[in-house]
Image (spheres, helix red, strand yellow):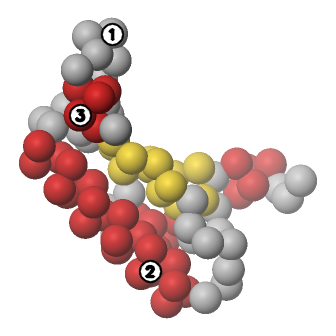
Amino acid sequence: LALTIASLSNLKLRGLMAIPTATDDVQLQQQEFSQLKQLFDQLKQQYPSVDTLSMGMSGDMDIAIANGSTMVRIGSAFFGER
């Protein structure tokens, strides 16, 4: 997918975005965020324009940030649960 995006002149690959498994298992969240960080680092080596690792939400943002997240989604921290 990254190779295809790189070949399109009107698109610029900026990074990856992911949501971990919906669980309270901190170890599983840590593992998933760590894996995504590894993929991000590999992608960044091939494509210098990659600068965004969007992962984590209000409930797991500390783990996400510790694993290199550059963008978190924190809507429920501001607005409360739906």
Q: In this view, does 55 lie above or below 14?
A: below
Residue behind mark 1: 10
Q: Mark 2 points at which residue?
A: 30
Count of picture labels: 3
For disc 3, the marked residue is: 3
Name the side, left or right, on which 45 lies relative to 64.
Answer: left
Q: Where is residue 25 in the image (x, y as percent from the top left)?
A: 61, 88
* SS class, disc 2: helix
Answer whether labels 3 and 2 touch (C-beta < 8 Å): no
Mark 3 or mark 1, which is nearer to you? 3
> Which residue sits at x=42%, y=70%?
33
Residue 17 in percent (x, y) is at 46, 48
Closer to us: 21 or 79: 21
Among the 4 quarters of the image, the one containing residue 35: bottom left
Question: Of the residues shown, which amino acid type is indicated by label 1?
Answer: Asn
On screen, residue 76 versus residue 17, left or right, reads right
Q: What residue type is labelled 2?
A: Gln
C-alpha span from label 3 to label 1: 14 Å
Foreground residue among 29 and 76? 29
Sooner in the amino-acid sequence: mark 3 or mark 2: 3
What is the x, y in percent for residue 80?
Answer: 83, 56
- Vertical relation: 35 (above or below) 41: below
Q: Distance between the residues labelled 3 and 2?
A: 28 Å
Secondary structure under tag 1 reads: loop
User: In the orientation shown, which residue stands out farthest toward the right?
Assistant: 82
